[in-house]
Image (tube, rainbow, N blue to C red):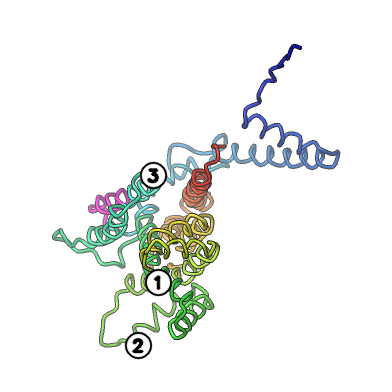
Amino acid sequence: MTLSLSATPLTPPRARAWRRKATAIVSSPANAVVSLIVAALLALGLWWFLRWSILDAAWTGGPEACKARAGACWPFVWTNWRLMAFGVYPQELLWRPILGLALMAGVVVFSMIPRFWGWPLIAAWAATPAAVCALLAGVFAMRRVPTNDWGGLPLTLLVWMIAFAGAFVIAVPLALARRSTMGGLRVASVVVIELVRGAPMLVVLYVSRFIVPMMAPAFDVDLFVSVEAALILFVASYLAEIVRAGLQSLPAGQMEAAQALGLGYWRTMRLVLLPQALRAVIPALVNLGVGVLLSTPLVAVIGMTDFLSAVREAASHEQEWPACYTTAYFVAGAVFFSACFAVSRYSRWLERRGAGAPRA
């Protein structure tokens, strides 16, 4: 008796995924028609964008060159990039916000590499915003720069970094307190979380800008400090619910096994439960981080010049620079989209890495 084995070629997972997508597109006549319409609209939009941004755009010259073209006004960006990126910060001291921006971007990049995760990275997240604030203020230099002159992209990233990093310090205890068996502690945490979450972010900013200085007239409350304190509390209330959801998703056997090994409450939380809970809520954490970053332009309503405000200020001379308004806001949108898209793709990679799935 002979046994013959026929080798069947194996299709790579990536090819199988593309084959399934292609089959779904033309799985029925209706799907095929819808796919053709969507493809035509996308092609039309791409062609319009290419004409506006490249073919019909002005690349060199001044306002006269932009008047002669129907597309984007890129000379406006080359001329006003300092104002758009750094606001009204003194021109001769621009090395400070540039260095601060590089420090914050470096910490964010290193945070995306799992082998650097540890206490040194946590210390870097605590020390970097403080160092950037001292650098922008001129603590280690002769010339001081008030916080009202901080602006542009460094201020946006600094506001986001302090708010998100500081929120973790408050959110984890709030989440643990809400799960506590002590009634008073649990009620207090519920009141804080629900009270802050029930107020819009704009209201929280107005309270920090106008109400807090009225409550402490004897103290000169800096606008940047009051805004950051309000944002930390606001983000922490949402982050606490995310952490609590991650803890509740874990089976009760995790706590019981840790107690059987002789681990105390805090060691169980630090070594067993919190790492698993944070890994389970990575999408929610990324969504919150992106939402906070996209909400930073709201600080403009209380007098702070963030990146979008600096872009708006640069684009206020539309009579001198034709089409600069659209070009300036396109640049701002491209910056925000690039940051959020990169973080979104990183979160997907992190989820696959945690689940042990192959890269797509």
| Residue mark closest to the camera, 1 vs 2 | 1
Residue at (35%, 59%) from the top-left corner?
158
What amino acid is labelled 3 in the image?
Ile
> Mark 2 Cα within 10 Å, few/some/many (few <14, many 20+)?
few
What amino acid is labelled 2 in the image?
Met
3D distance between C-alphas at marks 3 and 1: 26 Å
Residue 99 image point, x, y percent: 27, 50
The first of marks 1 and 2 along the sequence is 1
* The label number, if any, that marks residue 173 in the structure image: 1
Tell which of 212 and 65 is nearer to you: 212
**Quadrant housing residue 62:** top left
3D distance between C-alphas at marks 3 and 2: 44 Å
What amino acid is labelled 1 in the image?
Pro
> Mark 3 Cα within 10 Å, few/some/many (few <14, many 20+)?
few
The secondary structure type at the circle numbered 3 is loop
Q: Is residue 268 magenta?
A: no
Please report contact status of discs 3 and 2: CB closer than 8 Å, yes or no.
no
Residue 309 image point, x, y percent: 43, 61
Q: Is residue 187 above or below residue 77?
A: below
Q: Residue furthest front?
A: 1
Q: Which residues are magenta?
A: 90-103
**Quadrant housing residue 70:** top right
The residue singled out by tag 3 in the image is 113
Tell which of 13 and 257 is nearer to you: 257
Residue at (68%, 37%) from the top-left corner?
43
Residue 61 image point, x, y percent: 43, 38
* The label number, if any, that marks residue 215 in the structure image: 2
Residue 131 image point, x, y percent: 24, 58
- Is 37 left, or right, of 107 in this rendering? right
